[in-house]
Amino acid sequence: MKRAISVGAALAAIGLFSAWAARAQPPAPEPGDGPRYSNGTDLIRPANYREWVFLSSSLGLTYEASGSASNRPPTFGNVFVNPSSYRSFMQTGKWPDKTIFVLEFRQSETAASINKNGRFQTTLAVVEAEVKDSRFPDGWAFFNFGSGPPGPAGVGVPPLSGDRAAPCVECHTQHTAVERTFVQFYPTLFEVAKRLGTVKPNYTDP
């Protein structure tokens, strides 16, 4: 009887340890989750990114000085991230390799239907992406898909390079709160990063 009890206790302990270990490990990428490429580095625009985790939305966000913006109506910026990377960030405060963000800009309108004030989102203006992937020399890459519909399956767009990439790289290096990402604009994730101590040491909380 004593032997049976000890064996049962050992099995229970193994089960508890296995469950703890499973929770401690960042989730593995899901099938179809994460970036897909043609020609090795040309990113294929995700067809279902609007089913991913929605991080935040902004209206008229600009990096230009006050007064230098155009008179055009402000656009909305919607940010999505692949689900497995989101869950990993919630556990670790860091973005795993093969993270992909999609930034969708949409035009804004007012005074339509029953709306009398404020602005709402309308037509698609442009789709961009930021990818964390070790296949790129810098570990990160930026892409611009324009405003058109997704291309044929297996056809992607090349990463921005040279003078086109320089502003993205500089901004995402100097002004981001966590790695190369503007987590400071995603309130719930910013709290996670501060709690887990992954905010950049040189980042100043506004």
Image: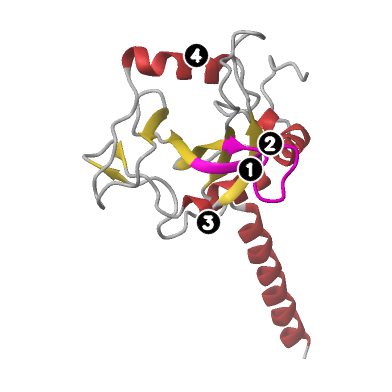
In the rendered picture of this protein, how many numbered marks are placed on residues? 4
Q: Residue at x 28, y 41 (%)?
A: 156
**Residue type at tag 3:** Glu
Q: Name the residue that disc number 3 marks.
A: 51
Give the mark nearer the N terminus: 3 vs 4: 3
Q: Name the residue that disc number 1 marks.
A: 55
Which circle marks residue 186 in the picture?
2
Regarding residue 135, the answer to whether it shows in the image is yes
**Other residues around mark 3 within 10 Å, as few (<14) / some (14–19) / many (≥20):** few
Residue 117 image point, x, y percent: 75, 38
Distance from Cα at disc 1 to Cα at disc 4: 22 Å
**Residue type at tag 1:** Leu
Q: Residue at x 25, y 50 (%)?
A: 152
Q: Which residues are magenta?
A: 108-123
Q: Are marks 1 and 3 in contact (CB under 8 Å)?
A: no
Nearer to us: label 1 or label 4: 1
Q: In terms of secondary structure, where does tag 4 sit?
A: helix
In the picture, the quarter occupied by the C terminus is top right
Distance from Cα at disc 1 to Cα at disc 3: 12 Å
**Other residues around mark 1 within 10 Å, as few (<14) / some (14–19) / many (≥20):** some
